Image: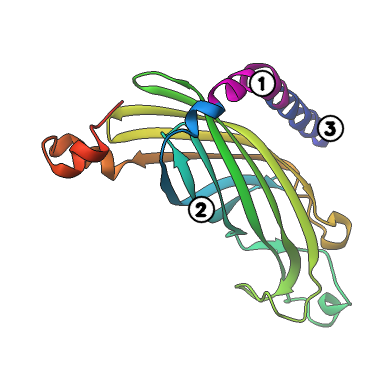
Amino acid sequence: MHVNLLSMRFIVAFFIFAFLSLSVRAQFMDTLHEVFKYHASIDARLESRNSIINNGIVSVNGVRLGVAFRRKLRIGGGLSWLRTELANPVPNFGDSLINPGIVRRYKLMYLCYYIDFVFYKSKRWQLSVPIQAGTGINWNQYGKGYRVFGPEKKYFALLYEPGITVQYKVFKWFGLGSDLAYRFAYSHARQTGINLNGPTFSFRIEFWFDQLYFDLFPQSDVTKRFGPAEW
């Protein structure tokens, strides 16, 4: 089972890298100069993604803030953290021998830097390539919550997550989306007992308030200046 899962991870990573290098690079370079000619808008969002850590599914939350150019390119940064209370059975300093009821929990928190490029767009479908990198810390602690400045030893974490995003628009202002990526990580797995390498995925509902406003009020001054709503 372990060998099969490891092989699957390498297969997913191979196809992601092949897709990025062959299908996206030329289009990205051709349109990058054109996109930057237009005014930027704010890209602010909350996100929740699923991830596989130590063969189990966990949840990673995050906040994002950046700029978007014509909905074709998004660049920014944010903060992500492991939401799931992931119990770590690896003993530390003999505490589990003194009190067998003590449970260590794995913690991960990192700053992320992202770029998301749309390489295909039709009336309802959109395909984009999100690439995210992160630098942060991970550690084990006793008790729930996050004690970033607690006495537990912290370890440096470096993450890189290339992927692909599919989006389907039901209306101009409402749609569905899905992300699939693979996380490569340097995170002192031997010291923490947790291996962060693995796939990440999410399914989400998309709602664009500006497009809804443009659709409901096509003659307003705001719509005439920033609209109209578009597929």
The circle drawn on residue 19 is: 1
> Relative to residue 191, is residue 64 depicted above or below?
above
Does dot 3 land on a helix, a strand or a loop?
A: helix
Of the numbered discs 1 and 2, the one sitting upstream in the chain is 1
Question: Residue placed farthest to the left in the image?
Answer: 219
C-alpha separation, residue under disc 1 versus residue under disc 2 = 25 Å
Does dot 1 land on a helix, a strand or a loop?
A: helix
Residue 75 image offset from top left, x and y in percent: 55, 43
Q: Specify whether 130 is left or right of 157.
A: left
Q: Nearer the viewer, mark 3 or mark 2?
A: 2
The crowd level at tag 1 (other Cα within 10 Å; few <14, some 14-19, many 20+) is some
| Dot 1 amino acid type | Phe
Residue topped by disc 3? 3
Instruction: Give the magenta range.
Output: 17-31
| Dot 3 amino acid type | Val
| Dot 2 amino acid type | Arg
C-alpha separation, residue under disc 1 versus residue under disc 3 = 24 Å
Residue 91 image offset from top left, x and y in percent: 84, 69
What residue lies at 28% left-to-right and 28% top-to-bottom? 230
* Quarter-of-image position of residue 96: bottom right
* Quarter-of-image position of residue 97: bottom right
Query: Does 202 appear in magenta?
Result: no
Residue topped by disc 2? 64
Of the numbered discs 3 and 2, the one sitting upstream in the chain is 3
The crowd level at tag 2 (other Cα within 10 Å; few <14, some 14-19, many 20+) is some
The circle drawn on residue 34 is: none
> Relative to residue 160, is residue 4 depicted above or below?
above
Of the numbered discs 1 and 3, the one sitting upstream in the chain is 3
**Secondary structure predominantly adopted by residues drawn in magenta:** helix
What residue lies at 62% left-to-right and 63% top-to-bottom? 85
Q: Specify whether 68 is left or right of 196.
A: left
Q: Are marks 1 and 2 in contact (CB under 8 Å)?
A: no
